[in-house]
Image (cartoon, coloured by chain):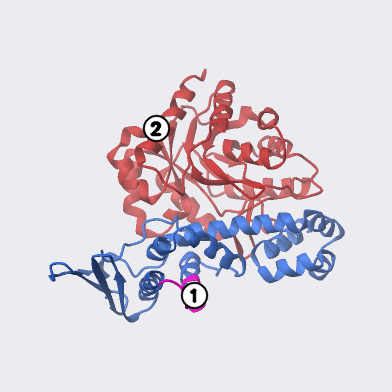
Chain colours: A blue, B red
Amino acid sequence: VSLAALQSALASVFTDPEARARFAADPEAFAAHLGLPDVGRAQLRALGTAAVSSYASTLARKRRSEAAGFLPRTRAALGETFATTFESWALRTMQAPGPTRNRSDASRYCDWLWNSQEGCAESVREALAWDRHELRATARPVYLGFARLSGSESNTYGAWLKFGRTWHWQLASKRRQAGGSLARSAAALGDRGLVTGDTPVADGTGKRPGPR
Amino acid sequence: VVAAVERRLGAGLSLRRRHVADVLAHPASVDLLEIVADHYFTPARRDELAVLNERFTLVPHGLELSLGSAAGVPADYLRDLAALIAAIDPPYWSEHVAFTRVGERRIGHLAPIPFTREALDVFVCNVARVRESIEQPLILENIACPFDIPYAEFTEAEFLTLLVERTGCGLLLDVANLFYNALNRGQDPRACLDRYPLEAVVQCHLAGGHRAGDEWVDSHAESVPEPVWDLFAEVCRRVPLRASIVERDEHLPAFLDLAHEVARARDLMRGTSA
């Protein structure tokens, strides 16, 4: 019984930022509120906030690692800032349950960054917009979106048009500024299972690349 | 379990999706592959699994069976895992000395269990339940964690010794986890190794971590550092290791660089007396 209660308390402070804050403010009151037996209260109190914070940071790093595969352009645009901003955000949020939790993390981080970084570089906003379209188009049965990625010599345009679970189109055009020519590529992706959900635990790889 | 895994399997890689094409192109670079079991529960990767199983010895590695959970192991996860293991019939499979769930609540990472009699009884009970569904041998991995749950009744080494005695499981010794745990506790890694039940070790994990603030983190983001190689070499001198696996999740180098680490592990294992 005491192990079950302790594990429940640990799961709470490891994953829930509000519970972690309550624990940091008053470990004894937090343990008492959970109804832990004496030994569990002593264990939790002796564990201390430093250990709990350490574990929470490890979990934030893992969430970042697993969501990164869904955010290739944002990650590239932010460089090293991606890790610090994502982990900072992850420490303040709980991970969604279920097999799509990594995709959900990526999507929620995108939305947070989009809403909180009004003054960020245009290249970052373009990358964010592109990754958001990718995430939303995959998650929704009907979707229409358009985005642009600026390059030093060319611009890449993406359009997302999706109806139902089997239609998922992307179009990309690359305008070469110097020659003025327009190269087009189109890919019908719906038949390749791209509308399916996440694997239960993504390894941060294998996400379908968008149009180049 | 050690006796049940009769043949030496060699050295290999913990497979990530980005490596699949490379290992198929360079099959001689690995003797076996460890697959994350959770990645193959859905039908989407069945074809890939069939191809891999045809060409390589596969060892499934579970992440979320939560063998240390007082609430028991999750029935749905156990069902999927048992089906996967039945499909590929590996020489053994592995999980962690940890808990990852409390009822329906998933932590999303390996969490430490207290090294107490109660936790030991729970773990033994959970392993017994799993054995009703999976007959292939199970080996258990020590996790990386910079702290222990207070008021422990055993050290980690004592807990693992009792665990292998009572369950009959083998050990998957993650040498990097042992190394970084020792550093984070201000202990001598070699002295920690001496206390482990090495006679039960079937397989080793090798990886490289990094320093974050005051802590060492087993992030699988760097090459295997020399002190971890030294500890691994010591393990190879002492026990007839069946397999070793190189893990890498971030800052991926060229595949051939990973293959070089696998080759180094193979060479060290070949120095072992069987």
Q: In the picture provided, is A206 more to the left or to the right than B102?
A: left
- The residue type indicated by label 2 comes to His
Q: In the picture provided, is A192 more to the left or to the right than B213?
A: left
| Residue located at (28% from left, 74% from top) | A166
Residue at image mark 1: A117
- The residue type indicated by label 1 comes to Gln
Res A71 → quadrant: bottom left
Instruction: Report the span colored magenta.
Output: A108-121
Real-space CA distance between mark 2 and mark 1, rounded to the nearest whole angstrom: 43 Å
Q: Is residue B270 visible?
A: yes
Q: Residues within 10 Å of mark 1 (few under 14, many from 20)?
A: few
In reply to whether residue B192 is colored magenta, the answer given is no
- Give the numbered dot on residue B260: 2
- Give the numbered dot on residue B187: none
Is A62 located above or below residue A149 in the figure?
above
Q: Nearer the viewer, residue B47 or A18?
A: A18
Res B57 → quadrant: top left
